[in-house]
Image (cartoon, rainbow, N blue to C red):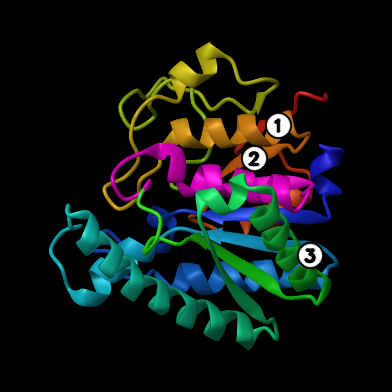
Amino acid sequence: MSEITQAKRVVVKVGTSTLTYENGKLNLRRVEALCKVLSDLQNSGREIVLVTSGAIGVGVGKLGLRERPKETEKKQAVAAVGQCELMFIYDKFFGEYNRTVAQVLITGDAMEYDHSRKNVENTFQELIGMGIIPVVNENDTMAVDELVGSHIGDNDTLSAMVACLVEADLLVLLTDIDGLYTANPRKDPEAKRIPYVAQVTDEIRALAGGAGSSRGTGGMATKVRAADIAGAQGIPCCVLSGATPENLYRLFDGEQIGTVFGTKRD
């Protein structure tokens, strides 16, 4: 656990189901608690990068829509509204704890080409060096991979790519379940949480099968994929319940919570 407790540069990804209520509106109490904890962790000397989902979910709530739109163009429009609302709230809450945030919207192809990738990398390094917390999301008005259902563009994978890009010491995925289980804990009362996964195997991928919530695009499968991507670059990953953001303190204090995924360099 020392690699976790001593992690200095940490990428934290928060999912839509953690940020919002069932009706799609922001869970302000939880968002405020998250911003407080991340600000405090940065005060302690850690470097924080936040990858956030929720633009479409928040946009649905903001516009009073009864359901998530199915047409790609409408999803893009709703995401644009939601992204504005998200950043307003993050700026407000982080600002209350004397932290400055920056919006970073990126697309998959920006990570694929050396020149654009280097530009993104330089931006992150400057922001982190200035003590600013980058708040990262996919640019949904330009990238449609996530919107049309392809998991190439999901934010779990994006967070792993960002972790690799900034050479993070740890990736934390905050979600609506407290780790990987031997079966679906919502359906099987005998399901047991798996505290540690040394390596992502086909068996682990099979356990992670299934979709996410109605408000998000990811499920446990995308989180296992993200852990695999990060692990290949020597970055451990922890899947953790985001219902109580203070769980991050417990994680960094060395308590065994969630599911920790080892690295291929272990």
Of the numbered discs 3 and 2, the one sitting upstream in the chain is 3
Residue identified by numbered label 2:
238
Of the numbered discs 2 and 1, the one sitting upstream in the chain is 1
The magenta span reads 145-173
The location of residue 63, given as percent across then percent down, is 21, 75
The location of residue 123, given as percent across then percent down, is 72, 68
Q: Nearer the viewer, mark 2 or mark 1?
A: 1
Q: Which part of the image, by quadrant, shows the N terminus?
A: top right
Q: Is residue 39 above or below residue 266?
A: below
Going by the numbered disc 3, the residue's amino acid type is: Gln
Q: Is residue 255 left or right of residue 5?
A: left
Kindly report the distance in space between the C-alpha atoms of the residues bearing marks 3 and 2. Answer: 23 Å
Let me know if residue 46 appears in the view.
yes
Q: Is residue 91 left or right of residue 219?
A: right
The verdict on residue 149 being magenta is yes
Residue identified by numbered label 1:
231
Seen at 71% across and 57% down, the residue is 249
The location of residue 36, given as percent across then percent down, is 63, 73
Going by the numbered disc 2, the residue's amino acid type is: Cys
Task: Specify the label residue 251 is tagged with.
Answer: none
